[in-house]
Amino acid sequence: MDQRHVFREAAREQGLPDDLIDRWLQHSRPRTELTRDGDGPIAGRFGGRPALPEDVAWPDGQVHLVTVDLAALPAGSHDLGLPADGTLILFSEMDMCPDESTLLHIPAGTAVQDRTDHDHHVFPPFPLHARTGWSVPQDPGLDLPDDVEEAFTEATDALSTDDDTLFTIGGHGDVATSGVGHPVQSPATETLIAQLFLPSSLVDDAFGGADWWHLSAVLDTPDLPARRFHLTRFIPDWLG
């Protein structure tokens, strides 16, 4: 879903002029969207058993959620400067507010094998298709009068991730619904790596029975080029 079009229409309904809307939208960022359906390239997988190097453990007490093939992502689908190849693998405890989640990067060319550990929960796997989407900021920091700022805030309420999207890479991120605030508290020093969106129709009550369970992965910006993914912070969220 192209959030720019949704936002423009919502902003016009608030009576905001196109020149101000354009200023806001100049701060939009591309994001990779991984979906259950679609005609984009298969670039990942939900569930199943992860493929890991022999010396990398399946995180204890965590379920494998998503594996992303970075080399299969559409060119320009995000602006993070992630490695061009290898895999990103996301794990988490099955809890509404997990104490532990894990994001791994496995470099290309690393010998891996599918893990057959029988003491881990495994969700039925299916492929994920990649496409380029766009993400509109909740607050790009423009110097606007209070009433105009309030109208833009109303317009951003129209933004949401469509139900078909399970995993996003990059962008500004969706605002939390449970009162915890935006996952990125300091845009100048933090980077949103990814967000996961799991409906109860897919995972039943595995994450507390919420209608939707979200997980945001945030990294201090200097740690991204250094590939220090083990320092990723995770912010859970839920709806219903």
Image: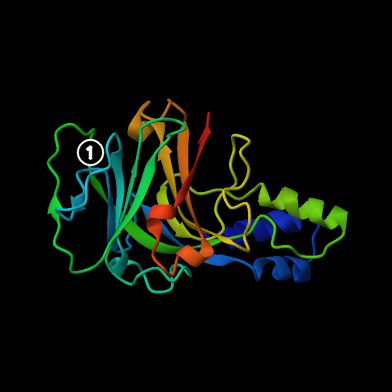
| For residue 193, side relative to residue 110 (left or right) | right
Q: Position of residue 170 (x, y in %)?
A: 48, 61
Q: Which residue corresponds to the image point at 80% horizontal and 51% vertical from the top-left?
A: 150
Way the structure is coloured: rainbow
Examine the rendered structure and indicate whether residue 13 appears above or below residue 17.
above
Q: Position of residue 17 (x, y in %)?
A: 80, 65
Q: Nearer the viewer, residue 128 or 8?
A: 128
Examine the rendered structure and indicate whether residue 58 appears above or below residue 11.
above
Q: Which residue corresponds to the image point at 55% horizontal and 53% vertical from the top-left?
A: 173
Q: Position of residue 39 (x, y in %)?
A: 32, 61
Element at label 1: loop
Instruction: Evaluate whether residue 14 shows in this view.
Output: no
Q: Which residue corresponds to the image point at 18% horizontal and 65% vertical from the top-left?
A: 110
Instruction: Characterize the local packing of mark 1: few (<14), some (14-19) or many (20 or more) Cα atoms within 10 angstroms.
Output: few
| For residue 21, side relative to residue 217 (left or right) | right
| Type of amino acid under label 1 | Pro
| For residue 13, side relative to residue 5 (left or right) | right
Q: Quadrant of residue 145?
A: bottom right
Instruction: Evaluate whether residue 81 shows in this view.
Output: yes
Q: Nearer the viewer, residue 2 or 136?
A: 136
Q: Which residue is mark 1?
A: 124
Q: Which residue corresponds to the image point at 29% horizontal and 69% vertical from the top-left?
A: 85
Count up the numbered dots: 1
